Amino acid sequence: VQPNSCRHFLSLFDVSADEARALIARAIELKQMLKAGQVYAPFQRRTLAMIFEKSSTRTRVSFETGMAQLGGHALFLSPRDTQLGRGEPIEDSARVISSMVDAVMIRTFDPETVERFAAYSRVPVINGLTDRLHPCQLLADMQTYFEHRGDIRGRRVAWIGDGNNMCNSFIEAAQLFDFELMVACPEGFEPSADILAPAGDRVTIVREPEAAAEGAHLISTDVWASMGQEEEQARRQKAFATYQVNDTVMARAAKDALFLHCLPAHRGEEVTASVIDGPQSVVWDEAENRLHAQKALLEFLLLANS
Ligand code: CP
Ligand code: NVA
């Protein structure tokens, strides 16, 4: 493979609608194989470098475990103990790391870091979350909906809260998986305008959580202050005080509506314990599905590029 000629997964739009559905189907299949005790380890001697410039529980555990289950190996790299934290240019790091490993996952702040890395990488690069997007989470979220309720096409989804990286990825997912999205966010906390624009009237922004939840088949939310926004905590607590998924909001949704949260969650802030620990919540399946969805993604990227 020549540098820059391989496929990356920086956003959901790096796969087609058909490929996205195939990935979900494959994730469900890989999950069943694992539960049946079937060993599937096609990645002998393959390695994944995982660069984490932000904290992680799910993303790290799922990628590392996924690579091990597939017969490969994953390396955890943090800026604290690599030259990335001492100013080595991202382009140089990309050339060096990608000359030795088979794929790279990056979690960082600025989306440009992932894009620059990908431009100089000779192996697939996966976005493990930036300030702008969290596409791997949406694969798991879609898998979870498909498993519990079938196809999400034509369904109504409500996003309550911050127009953040998760919300941006939900907007992309609405287009890729063909569903309607209602976003309830406070003024000044809207999703990125350039991500919203191509979605057209598929996505509607409202101010009232109850209005967004009306008739929804799926409701999701996220923390009021994301990683890197710790200093805005007080301002955000105030701005988001009424943006909570609680029993009143859930009551406006369809009877069989599901609740998703990428986690970690703050009970009593963006969601009540009654909802996240209640019967409509499928957040533990959602978290587990990170493993299965990303195994499908790794298989897709490594096979597509080999
Ligand atoms: N949802 C998610 O990405 O979790 P982590 O931050 O624990 O990886
Ligand atoms: N919006 C959150 C998601 C964490 C998985 C953050 O960026 O911190």
Image (cartoon, rainbow, N blue to C red):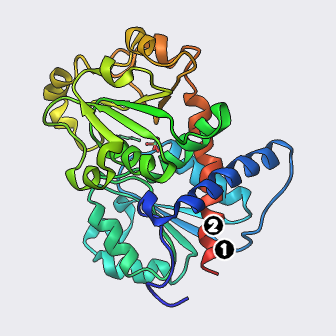
Q: Residue at x 36, y 74 (%)?
A: 117
CB-based contact (under 8 Å), mark 2 and mark 1:
yes
User: For mark 2, does the 10 Å Cα neighbourhood hold few (<14), some (14 to 19), or many (20 or more) residues?
Assistant: some
Give residue 112's position: percent from left, percent from top: 27, 66
Residue shown at 16% from the left, 24% from the top: 239
- Quadrant position of the N terminus in the picture: bottom right
The quarter of the image holding the C terminus is: bottom right
**Which mark is drawn over residue 303?**
1
The residue carrying mark 2 is 300
Residue 28 in the image, given as x and y percentages of width and height = 71, 46
Amino acid on which the number 2 mark rests in the picture: Phe
Is 96 on the left-hand or right-hand side of 17? left
Q: On the image, which quarter does residue 144 sit in?
A: top right
The one nearer the camera, 47 or 291, is 291
Q: Give percent across and percent down for residue 259.
A: 50, 25
**Above or below — where is 210 with respect to 170?**
above
Q: CA distance from mark 2 to mark 1?
A: 5 Å
Where residue 106 sits in the image (x, y, percent)? 42, 61
State which quadrant residue 12 falls in.
Answer: bottom left
As displayed, is residue 128 above or below residue 183?
A: below
Please state if 256 lies on the left or on the right of 147 as rendered.
left
Q: Amino acid at mark 1?
A: Leu
Near mark 1 (Cα within 10 A), the count class, few <14, some 14-19 or many ≥20, is: few
User: Would you say residue 40 is visible in this rendering?
Assistant: yes
Q: Nearer the viewer, residue 194 or 294?
A: 194
Residue at x 27% of width, y 69% of height: 86
